Amino acid sequence: MNKKIILFITFFTCLIPILLWGQENYEIQVYPAETIAPSYTGIELHSNISASGKPMIDQVRPTQNALRQTLEITHGFATNFEIGFYQFLNTQKDFGSQWVGTHIRPKITIPEQWHLPVGLSLSTEIGYQRRAYSADTWTAEIRPIIDKDFRVFYISLNPAFGKSLEGLNKNQSFSFEPSCKVAFHINQKIDFGAEYYGSTGPLFNRLKSTDQQHTLYAALDLNLNPDWEFNCGTGWGMTQSTDGFIVKLIIGYKFGDKNKLKKS
């Protein structure tokens, strides 16, 4: 096996114990390093349901049988630069369908002309969510993204850092919120692998293991058309603070000038 591949797998394996912290369940996705092409627009619908959720905690509504949906619109404003916009919705039997909040996410990536051995980009995110659905109403996130395709499989690492700007945890330092993905290329149109999302708490004051959040997903990607995105998965929470069982689905479509579309 190529020495570079061995080194990268070793690096990834060493990171696994550290990458234990996760993003909100409205947007269950590990990002790739690439950005959408200039003048192109992508629309994604993220949907997931917690078949085994958590009770009310810190006056945040329970997650049992909660259907969460996120409408994401991403536009390429320049080469290697995009901005994503999010609207979050929640539907539950006791509360009906409710608007939850909105975020904005600029993202910049290293140009391909630099010929780095890995894809490298930086995403930032800031936004509001209603107090009934989050202990923190205003939050920000910094997300470095590192990825690499090894022909047989693809790896993406998202070691994110989150900060409460207003709410219960606003006096806490940045929290470590990574996620990662390994996808094996079954053939040219089907990828199958695992996604991980976790949450350990403040960087210098980690939560007890029982209070941390760790979720592992079996995930399927269909690459049937370069304009379409399809990702689905089932996730299992590994601590008592995590939703026990989640099913997720992402469907996306991008449109614009075909001559400017990047190869997927």
Image (cartoon, rainbow, N blue to C red):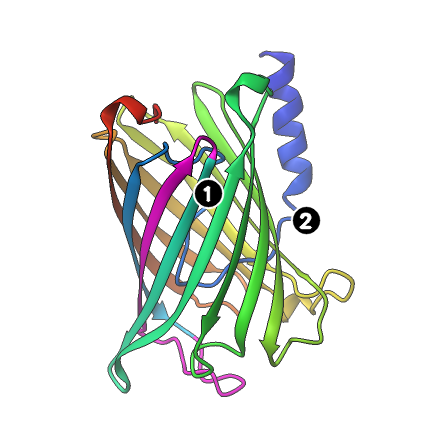
Residue highlighted by disc 1: 31
Left or right: where 151 falls relative to 90: right
Relative to the observer, which residue lies in front, 133 or 130? 130
Query: Is 5 left, or right, of 155 in this rendering?
Result: right
Amino acid type, residue under disc 2 in the picture: Ile
Q: Residues within 10 Å of mark 2 (few under 14, many from 20)?
A: few
Q: Quadrant of residue 68?
A: bottom left
Q: Which mark is residue 18?
A: 2
Q: Residue 113: horizontal and vertical position, in percent?
A: 54, 17
Question: The magenta stretch spans which residues?
Answer: 54-80
- The image position of residue 177, as x and y in percent, is 59, 56
Q: Is residue 253 visible?
A: yes
Query: What's the CA distance linking mark 2 and mark 1?
Result: 18 Å
Provide residue 200's location: percent of width, then percent of height.
Answer: 65, 62
Occupied quadrant, residue 16? top right
Residue drawn at (43%, 18%) of the image:
151
Residue occupying the point 64% across, 76% down: 169
Q: Is residue 249 above or below residue 118?
A: below
Count of numbered marks:
2
| 197 with respect to 76 (left or right) | right
Q: Secondary structure at mark 1?
A: loop
**Mark 2 or 1, closer to the camera:** 1
Residue 209 or 164: which is nearer the viewer? 164
The three-letter code of the residue at mark 1 reads: Tyr
Dot 2 or dot 1, earlier in sequence: 2
In percent of width and height, residue 59 lies at: 49, 88
The residue lying at 64 percent from left, 36 percent from top is 13
Q: Is residue 168 above or below residue 77?
A: below
- In the rendered view, tell whether residue 233 sits above or below residue 145: below
* Residue visible at 63% across and 16% down in the picture: 4
